[in-house]
Image (cartoon, helix red, strand yellow):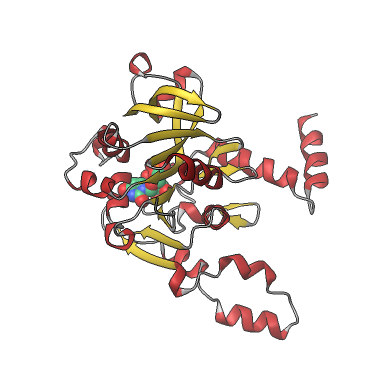
Amino acid sequence: MKPIRKAVFPVAGLGTRFLPATKAIPKEMLPIVDRPLIQYAVDEAREAGIEQMIFVTGRGKSAIEDHFDIAFELEKTMAERGKSLEVLEPTRLGPGNCAYVRQQEPLGLGHAIWCARDIVGDEPFAIFLPDEFMVGSPGCMKQMVEAYNRLGGNVISVLEVPHEAVSSYGVIAPGQSEGDTTEVLGLVEKPRVEDAPSNLIISGRYILQPEVMRTLESQEKGAGGEIQLTDAMARMIGTQPFHAVTFAGKRYDCGSKAGYVQANLAIALEREDMGEEIRAFALDLLK
Ligand code: UTP
């Protein structure tokens, strides 16, 4: 079984739900307290043993490249002033650890992943949607890699939502479960509530076999007129093992405004350097 060494981060979306904040700044650079969303996703990948980060970017996304580069002037000035550079340590991705590829038009998540096909090559790889913010220890991808090491094939993360909420997501048809893993018998993107096979939704983390790239290549547009990753994965079920892992942590949908504010509050409350202050403030505000 080949190890998971590469991760694809599709970051070429328009982020229209966050306008005007995302007019000039990528959605993935919005901070949760003081770290951008994309940094949390890269840290989660590193924790899972992933070595190469592949970013699928588009126009107006150069802040992401700058974020993971060396900031020469900033670092020199900070060093001269005796300030610690430790806080910048996780932002450094050397040339061997990152690659950037452009998606010229936002034709959908499936198309964004397909744009990375040459860099991914012929090996299984991980996908992170950075606006799905996963908090837990071990991290979501680490938990998934452990499942992959046992089961092989394809592994996706899922979570339960109220039945009436399924229409906004990719939904699985579950088979047998064992511990935190469930066999996946089918997948459908944004089903009507009455057609949904379960209330288990795909939650932004995937480990896929490279064959998905060939499946995407011949793919028609699906829900919303976009090339859907869910449709390509659905076509692979039956030809390869396919499992879902229920993440043992918390998930915040930071593609939505309410989820983003909740994530900021939750992380601020957990932080040693500010938790008490924010708790006192929040209690006061709610009085
Ligand atoms: P979303 O649908 O959540 O992102 O896609 P979006 O399109 O940027 O957001 P809204 O709905 O307009 O507010 C999930 C992930 O897939 C990427 C996005 O950047 C996000 O990380 N994506 C989506 C692409 O890279 N390319 C696409 O064509 C579509």
> In the current view of this chain or complex, which residue is farthest to the top?
194
Which residue is painted at 27% across and 52% down in the image? 114
Query: Which residue is nearer to you in this view: 189 or 268?
Result: 189
Residue 207 in the image: state x and y as whole percent: 41, 45
Query: Number of labelled discs?
Result: 0
Residue 69 in the image: state x and y as whole percent: 50, 72
Which residue is painted at 38% across and 61% down in the image? 60
Q: Is residue 58 above or below residue 75?
A: above
Locate residue 281 relative to residue 218 in the image: left or right: right
- Residue 4 falls in which quadrant of the image? bottom left
Which residue is painted at 41% across and 23% down in the image? 174
Q: Is residue 216 above or below residue 60?
A: above
Locate residue 104 relative to residue 127 in the image: left or right: left
Q: Is residue 238 visible?
A: yes
Locate residue 107 relative to residue 142 in the image: left or right: left
Which residue is painted at 55% across and 36% down in the image? 247
**Quadrant containing the C terminus in the rendered view:** top right
Q: Is residue 13 visible?
A: no
- Residue 39 falls in which quadrant of the image? bottom right
Residue 29 in the image: state x and y as whole percent: 51, 56
Q: Is residue 225 above or below residue 1?
A: above
Residue 24 in the image: state x and y as whole percent: 44, 59
